[in-house]
Image (tube, helix red, strand yellow):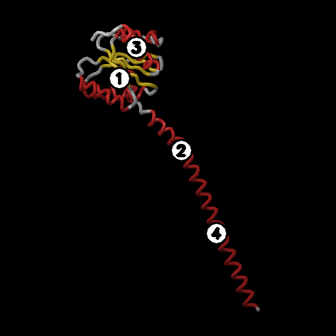
């Protein structure tokens, strides 16, 4: 399909906008995946808020140049069939989807990644996939912060109940003492 220069520039500008808005980029080789599998991968990635863009290498180079990411070391990996995974700020969820999908179908292979401007290898992407997601990490942090507070509240609650029990015992003792004194005074008269 022949495209005009203006159409290509429009595609580069759109891709540059997507790349600029993404703190995490994975460059993948999708060789061996049919259209149905690529569609399935796109669906899985979209479910976690990630874009999967199949792109010509020359257009990807231009988009990376426009976004000043040419020095990120991605140029040498833009050869052969290439798709960009634009993962935004959460590198873990995209890495999980890519790793799980590759475990199922042995494709796509990750050529390289760029997380917050730093290149990451395929092995590092697999390690990222092993990490808990951002939500899980926040939940663990919340639980870790909540546990000491809950223990402290339990101790305070126990002290409160002990104090209430002691006051009840004192009240009962005074009531019994006053009943004894009233009973003894009544018997003496």
Q: Is label 1 in a helix, a strand or a loop? A: strand
Which mark lies nearer to you, 4 or 2?
2
Which mark lies nearer to you, 4 or 1?
1
In this rendered view, identify the residue nearer to me: 23 or 65.
65
Mark positioned earlier in the residue sequence (4 or 2): 2
Residue at 37 percent of width and 26 percent of height: 95
Find residue 39 and report its horizontal and vertical position in percent.
28, 26
User: How far apart are the alpha carbons under marks 4 and 1?
Assistant: 69 Å
Q: Is label 3 in a helix, a strand or a loop? A: helix
- Read off the residue under disc 1: 52
Find residue 25 and report its horizontal and vertical position in percent.
41, 20
- Read off the residue under disc 3: 10
Q: Is label 4 in a helix, a strand or a loop? A: helix
Mark positioned earlier in the residue sequence (4 or 1): 1
Indicate the quadrant where residue 64 lies: top left
Contact between marks 4 and 1 (CB within 8 A): the answer is no
User: How far apart are the alpha carbons under marks 3 and 4?
Assistant: 81 Å
Left or right of 102? Residue 142 is right
As drawn, the label of residue 146 is 2
Mark positioned earlier in the residue sequence (1 or 2): 1
- Read off the residue under disc 4: 168
Left or right of 149? Residue 41 is left
Left or right of 97? Residue 155 is right
Establish if 51 lies above or below 171. Answer: above
Find residue 31 and report its horizontal and vertical position in percent.
25, 17
Circle 3 Cα neighbour tier, 10 Å, few/some/many (<14 / 14–19 / ≥20): few
Residue at 55 percent of width and 45 percent of height: 148
Mark positioned earlier in the residue sequence (3 or 2): 3
Mark positioned earlier in the residue sequence (3 or 1): 3
């Amino acid at each position: 399909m022949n495209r005009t220069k203006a159409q290509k520039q429009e595609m580069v500008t759109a891709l540059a906008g997507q790349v600029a808005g993404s703190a995490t980029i994975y460059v993948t080789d999708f060789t061996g995946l049919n259209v149905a599998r690529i569609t399935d991968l796109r669906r899985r990635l979209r479910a976690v808020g990630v874009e999967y863009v199949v792109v010509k290498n020359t257009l990807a180079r231009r988009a990376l140049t426009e976004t000043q990411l040419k020095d990120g070391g991605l140029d040498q990996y833009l050869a052969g069939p290439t798709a960009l995974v634009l993962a935004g700020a959460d590198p873990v969820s995209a890495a999980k989807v890519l790793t799980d999908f590759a475990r199922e179908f042995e494709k796509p292979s990750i050529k390289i990644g760029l997380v917050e401007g730093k290149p990451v290898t395929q092995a590092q992407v697999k390690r990222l996939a092993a990490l808990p997601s951002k939500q899980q990490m926040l939940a663990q942090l919340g639980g870790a912060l909540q546990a000491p507070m809950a223990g402290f509240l339990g101790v305070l609650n126990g002290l409160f109940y002990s104090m209430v029990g002691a006051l009840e015992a004192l009240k009962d003792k005074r009531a019994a003492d006053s009943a004894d004194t009233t009973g003894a005074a009544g018997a003496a008269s």
